[in-house]
Amino acid sequence: MAVSAKPRGGLQNRVFHLATGGAAWLVLILLVAVAFSMLIGGKLAFQTFGFFGFVKSSQWDVVNGQFGALVPIYGTLVTSAIALIIAMPVSIGIALFLTDIAPAWSRQPIAVAIELLAAVPSIIYGMWGLFMFAPFMANHVEPWLNDHLGTAPVIGPLFNGPPIGIGMLSAGIVLGIMVIPFIASVARDVFNAVPAALRESAVALGSTRWEILRHVTLPYTRSAIVGAVFLGLGRALGETMAVTFVLGNAHDLSASLLMPSNSIAAAIANEFTEADTALYRSSLIALAFLLFVVTFIVLSLAKLMLRRMDRNLGRTH
Amino acid sequence: MNWILFRRRVADRIALVGAGLATAFGLVFLAWILWTTFANGAAAISVKLVTEMTPPPGSDGGLLNAFYGSAVMILLALAIGTPIGLAAGTYLAEHGRHTKLAATVRFVNDILLSAPSIVLGLFIYELVVVPSQHFSGYAGALALALILIPVVVRTSDEALRLVPDRMREAAFALGLPRWKVSTRILFKAARSGVVTGVLLGVARISGETAPLLFTALNNQFWSADMNAPLANVPVVIFQYAMSPYDAWHALAWAGALVLTIFVLTLNILVRLVARGRKSA
């Protein structure tokens, strides 16, 4: 192998090696530095309320300087969960359509269109969400949910609330649309990478396309699909602008998905420039620390699952 | 037809229709979002957009200072982020291809690629804004550079690894030192891949709002001072869209339209170029 040798001779060589290696180290240092600086910035909040006190408290009282992370954490998790519930089946459907069903000439344009969903800046999603989607939800979807699901047992409280369009449900749906392209493009790639022999064997046994998907393609690509979903989750957790527009910035804990709420990223975006006390600012940075740690874990899991799929493919080819 | 066969056929048909509907679902939302932006934005576009400054509430104006601020910050972010990203990508693909460090950096880089951009903005706030005690265009550009670097690292790493080893061996056989092999031969061979990555990075950072909120902040007036708060398109859109004034909403839509056209055009161009290269 011609690559990866020690730098030999020449000052320029050594400088070049140091510069490129330094840049690589910089990427590593960056990650650690971000986490560390969030921890330092949030230290005051963690010291004042205690780590668990901060995480478990639902109070957000600016006047009296009482801050707790529970409402933003809850809002972040609920909206991300709604996003995944929508994005998972839709993305797998899109991947199936693009690999198996669509006529060959239409696959490329449709795939590009779906990928463009990921290119649209999140602030555009936010504006569209605020001015178009939220009124649509308020006028057409949420009254129906109130009437038909709001009185149902168990899930009733989730869908019972004022039909104002701004709230966790709308934010979750917008997030779902935003993460679809990320999951769909990975799913399409791995569906395409399933060895033809496997699919052909299933066809020879008389399987329908649905049976091939369920019994051959999905089991074979499972770890990559899970990885892709985690990747989408990582995106959804940290998404800021789209959520800020449609979530309503309310610091109340509520069972109803139709109620305004808050998310970690939205709270920071809305309040950080207005935070006038050190403790207020520190509490927001402490929120950012929690968000960074959680997304780091989620994205690491995603990478590990995707890498496992790569190794599987390497072995079978 | 027996019952089992019938059931299998129905299940199959449902799955196929479901897949078609899922695709339609995605496309409908793309069309809806784009249509909303075009309809509202086109109504608000006028020459004033590029000749006047952002107005106070109640009067009309343009976005000239915001366009200027965004352009300068993106260019500065490019100037900072591209060399660092390219250098790190070169290390991953060439010098350290099989080292543990390279594997770790690749892993971390992929995480930074998807990390919440608002946290990166807060990081620059802590690092630059707090010590200097004021918001500035420099801080904004630095925050954008942080988002650009992982994109460039990833794409230059991939582009360089696509260069066939024969080319490296031929260059080494001529007795070229390592740094010359990289800069004179491999960078040229991988150029279009690297440029693609940088352009995608520009598309990405030009729409980023969250990291600018507490770094560049905003500025209602014309200012070319990079050491002071600097107007920029995304934050202006954010503030104006959240305001109660109709004139501000219109300007926000006009800005949103320009931003969307810019970002989508870059994306489509990059794809066309990449495809042309593949078939050539």
Image (spheres, coloured by chain):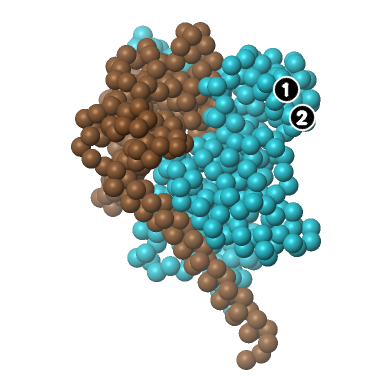
Chain colours: A cyan, B brown
Residue B134, label in figure = none
Which chain is mark 2 on? Answer: A
Residue occupied by mark 1: A66
As drawn, B262 above or below A139: above
Q: Nearer the viewer, residue A103 or A45?
A: A45
Residue furthest bottom as drawn: B1
Question: Which percent across, then down, holds residue A25?
Answer: 51, 19
In the figure, is residue A306 to the left or right of B165? right
**Type of amino acid under label 1:** Gln
| Mark 1 crowdedness (10 Å alpha carbons): few <14, some 14-19, many ≥20 | some
Which chain is mark 1 on? Answer: A
As drawn, A209 above or below B31: below
At x 46%, y 20%, the residue is B215
Of pointers 2 and 1, the one earlier in the residue sequence? 2
Confirm or deny contact between disc 2 and disc 1 (CB under 8 A): yes
Is residue A278 visible in the rendered structure shown here? yes
Residue occupied by mark 2: A57
